[in-house]
């Protein structure tokens, strides 16, 4: 693949094609605009995203699409034991566990307190829903921060260990 202006423009359009989705779902709900304006902005952004994706595919061509497919298939359909799991450092582990605990506890307690004190009727549901969504995103992100070794330990929780032998009583 020749790395000329066409290639770099195609890569830039490809990267841009994902940005409007992030803006639409992560930033737009927090902006103080009306529903009509939000729908208009979202429609424009998503149309531009699709157009830029199609243009990037046209500019980058078949080799890029084959490379992209192989990367996606390789990451999704990876066989167990292909690569050794890399251990994470102590600081990264602490950050990941903190994220996991904060995401598991804080949004739900804040929601319960807001419901008990009547803030929902006063201020609306949108802020609480956004808080819960942020908590879910933080929860999922914490697993990526904790790394593959942590994923393997969590996965072992859901694997049936089989029948264990119970020692008989000796009289």
Image (tube, rainbow, N blue to C red):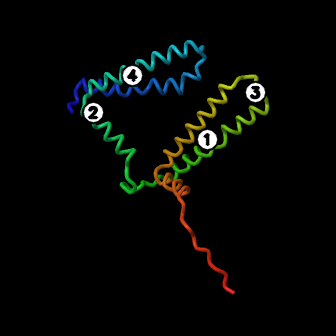
| Residue at x 51%, y 23% (from the top left corner) | 24
Q: Check the image and report above or below for 37 versus 83.
A: above
| Spatial separation of the CA atoms under disc 2 and disc 3 | 51 Å
Secondary element at image label 4: helix
Outermost residue toward the bottom in this view: 171
> Which quarter shows the C terminus?
bottom right
State the mark number for residue 64.
Answer: 2
Q: Which residue is mark 3?
A: 119
| Residue at x 54%, y 46% (from the top left corner) | 96
Q: Which residue is mark 1?
A: 103
Q: Earlier in the sequence, mark 1 or mark 4?
A: 4
Does the residue at mark 3 contact the one at mark 1 (Cβ under 8 Å)?
A: no
Secondary element at image label 3: helix
> Which quarter shows the N terminus?
top left
| Relative side of 124 to 154, left or right | right
Q: Earlier in the sequence, mark 4 or mark 2?
A: 4
The picture places residue 23, in percent across and down from the top left corner, at 49, 24
Q: Earlier in the sequence, mark 3 or mark 4?
A: 4
Q: Nearer the viewer, mark 2 or mark 3?
A: 2
Outermost residue toward the right in this view: 117
Q: Which residue is mark 4?
A: 50
Outermost residue toward the left in this view: 2
| Relative side of 79 to 148, left or right | left
Q: Check the image and report above or below for 1 versus 85.
A: above
Q: Nearer the viewer, residue 132 or 97?
A: 132
Secondary element at image label 2: helix
């Amino acid at each position: 693949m020749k790395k000329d202006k066409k290639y770099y423009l195609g890569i830039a359009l490809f990267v841009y094609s994902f940005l409007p989705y992030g803006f639409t779902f992560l930033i737009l709900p927090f902006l103080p605009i009306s529903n009509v304006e939000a729908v208009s902005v979202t429609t424009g952004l998503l149309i531009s995203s699709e157009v830029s994706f199609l243009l990037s595919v046209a500019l980058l061509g078949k080799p890029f699409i084959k490379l992209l497919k192989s990367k996606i298939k390789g990451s999704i359909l990876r066989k167990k034991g292909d690569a050794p799991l890399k251990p994470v450092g102590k600081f990264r582990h602490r950050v990941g566990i903190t994220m996991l605990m904060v995401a598991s506890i804080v949004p739900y307690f804040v929601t319960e307190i807001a419901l008990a004190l009547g803030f929902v009727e006063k201020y609306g549901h949108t802020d609480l829903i956004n808080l819960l969504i942020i908590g879910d995103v933080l929860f999922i992100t914490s697993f990526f921060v904790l790394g593959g070794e942590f994923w393997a330990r969590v996965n072992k929780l859901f694997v049936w260990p089989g029948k264990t032998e119970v020692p008989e009583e000796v009289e």
